[in-house]
Amino acid sequence: LLHAPIYGALGLTIATRTPLFGRPGQWPRRLAAATLPIAALCDLVENHGHETLLRAGPGADAGLVPLAAGFASAKWLLVALFASAVVIATLRLLLARRTTA
Protein backbone atom coordinates (compact mmCIF):
# COMPACT_ATOMS: atom_id res chain seq x y z
CA LEU A 1 0.00 0.00 0.00
CA LEU A 2 2.91 2.35 0.62
CA HIS A 3 4.78 1.69 -2.61
CA ALA A 4 2.39 3.67 -4.83
CA PRO A 5 2.62 6.97 -2.90
CA ILE A 6 6.38 6.51 -2.60
CA TYR A 7 7.05 6.11 -6.33
CA GLY A 8 4.45 8.78 -7.11
CA ALA A 9 6.29 11.22 -4.84
CA LEU A 10 9.63 10.16 -6.29
CA GLY A 11 8.43 10.93 -9.82
CA LEU A 12 7.08 14.28 -8.71
CA THR A 13 10.39 15.10 -7.01
CA ILE A 14 12.49 14.08 -10.04
CA ALA A 15 10.29 16.10 -12.37
CA THR A 16 10.16 19.27 -10.26
CA ARG A 17 13.49 19.36 -8.41
CA THR A 18 15.96 18.39 -11.13
CA PRO A 19 16.95 20.22 -14.33
CA LEU A 20 15.91 17.26 -16.51
CA PHE A 21 12.60 18.65 -17.73
CA GLY A 22 13.33 22.33 -18.26
CA ARG A 23 12.29 25.38 -16.33
CA PRO A 24 9.32 25.41 -13.95
CA GLY A 25 6.04 25.97 -15.76
CA GLN A 26 7.13 24.45 -19.05
CA TRP A 27 4.85 21.71 -20.37
CA PRO A 28 7.45 18.89 -20.28
CA ARG A 29 7.97 19.50 -16.57
CA ARG A 30 4.25 19.68 -15.87
CA LEU A 31 3.61 16.50 -17.85
CA ALA A 32 6.47 14.61 -16.19
CA ALA A 33 5.36 15.82 -12.77
CA ALA A 34 1.91 14.31 -13.29
CA THR A 35 2.96 11.01 -14.85
CA LEU A 36 4.05 8.90 -11.86
CA PRO A 37 1.47 10.27 -9.42
CA ILE A 38 -1.26 9.30 -11.92
CA ALA A 39 0.42 5.89 -12.34
CA ALA A 40 0.35 5.50 -8.55
CA LEU A 41 -3.38 6.24 -8.49
CA CYS A 42 -3.91 3.65 -11.23
CA ASP A 43 -1.91 1.19 -9.13
CA LEU A 44 -4.12 1.78 -6.08
CA VAL A 45 -7.32 1.32 -8.11
CA GLU A 46 -5.88 -1.86 -9.67
CA ASN A 47 -4.93 -3.22 -6.25
CA HIS A 48 -8.39 -2.46 -4.87
CA GLY A 49 -9.96 -4.30 -7.80
CA HIS A 50 -7.77 -7.35 -7.22
CA GLU A 51 -8.47 -7.31 -3.49
CA THR A 52 -12.21 -7.06 -4.11
CA LEU A 53 -12.05 -10.02 -6.49
CA LEU A 54 -10.05 -12.10 -4.05
CA ARG A 55 -12.34 -11.36 -1.12
CA ALA A 56 -15.48 -12.10 -3.12
CA GLY A 57 -14.28 -15.53 -4.20
CA PRO A 58 -15.96 -17.55 -6.93
CA GLY A 59 -18.85 -15.78 -8.61
CA ALA A 60 -17.34 -12.33 -8.10
CA ASP A 61 -18.26 -9.53 -10.47
CA ALA A 62 -16.42 -10.44 -13.67
CA GLY A 63 -16.50 -6.79 -14.76
CA LEU A 64 -13.76 -6.03 -12.25
CA VAL A 65 -11.23 -8.15 -14.16
CA PRO A 66 -11.01 -5.95 -17.27
CA LEU A 67 -11.27 -2.83 -15.12
CA ALA A 68 -8.29 -3.88 -12.98
CA ALA A 69 -6.41 -4.95 -16.12
CA GLY A 70 -7.06 -1.58 -17.73
CA PHE A 71 -5.72 0.30 -14.74
CA ALA A 72 -2.69 -2.02 -14.64
CA SER A 73 -1.99 -1.35 -18.31
CA ALA A 74 -2.34 2.39 -17.81
CA LYS A 75 0.01 2.25 -14.83
CA TRP A 76 2.74 0.41 -16.72
CA LEU A 77 2.35 2.64 -19.77
CA LEU A 78 2.81 5.74 -17.61
CA VAL A 79 5.80 4.21 -15.80
CA ALA A 80 7.43 3.31 -19.13
CA LEU A 81 6.77 6.81 -20.51
CA PHE A 82 8.31 8.42 -17.43
CA ALA A 83 11.36 6.16 -17.53
CA SER A 84 11.84 6.87 -21.24
CA ALA A 85 11.46 10.59 -20.65
CA VAL A 86 14.09 10.49 -17.89
CA VAL A 87 16.54 8.63 -20.14
CA ILE A 88 15.97 11.02 -23.06
CA ALA A 89 16.18 14.11 -20.85
CA THR A 90 19.38 12.83 -19.21
CA LEU A 91 21.01 12.14 -22.56
CA ARG A 92 19.93 15.56 -23.86
CA LEU A 93 21.36 17.26 -20.76
CA LEU A 94 24.65 15.34 -21.04
CA LEU A 95 24.99 16.16 -24.73
CA ALA A 96 24.29 19.85 -24.05
CA ARG A 97 26.97 19.92 -21.37
CA ARG A 98 29.42 18.15 -23.65
CA THR A 99 28.95 20.61 -26.52
CA THR A 100 29.33 23.65 -24.24
CA ALA A 101 32.48 22.31 -22.57
Image (cartoon, helix red, strand yellow):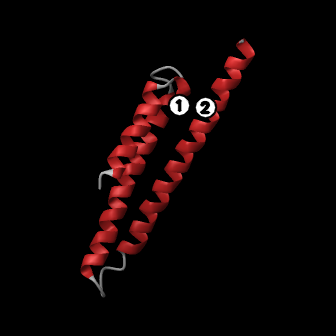
Task: Name the quarter where the N terminus is drawn.
Answer: bottom left
Q: Is 101 left, or right, of 54 in this rendering?
A: right
**Rendered image: mark on residue 55:** none
Q: Residue furthest bottom?
A: 58
| Above or below for 23 versus 63 | above
Q: Amino acid at mark 2?
A: Ala
Q: Residue at x 64, y 35 (%)?
A: 88
Residue where numbered disc 1 is placed: 28
Give me the C-alpha separation between circle 2 and circle 1: 10 Å
Which of discs 2 and 1 lies nearer the camera? The answer is 2
Q: Quadrant of residue 70?
A: bottom left
Q: Residue at x 68, y 20 (%)?
A: 96
Residue where numbered disc 2 is placed: 89
Task: Name the quarter where the C terminus is drawn.
Answer: top right
Marks 2 & 1, CB-CB < 8 Å contact: yes
SS for callout 2: helix
Q: Amino acid at mark 1?
A: Pro
In the depicted view, which residue is nearer to us: 99 or 62?
99
Q: Residue furthest right?
A: 99
Q: Residue at x 44, y 39 (%)?
A: 11
Q: Position of residue 75 (x, y in %)?
A: 46, 55
SS for callout 1: helix
| Above or below for 24 versus 50 | above
Q: Quadrant of residue 21?
A: top right
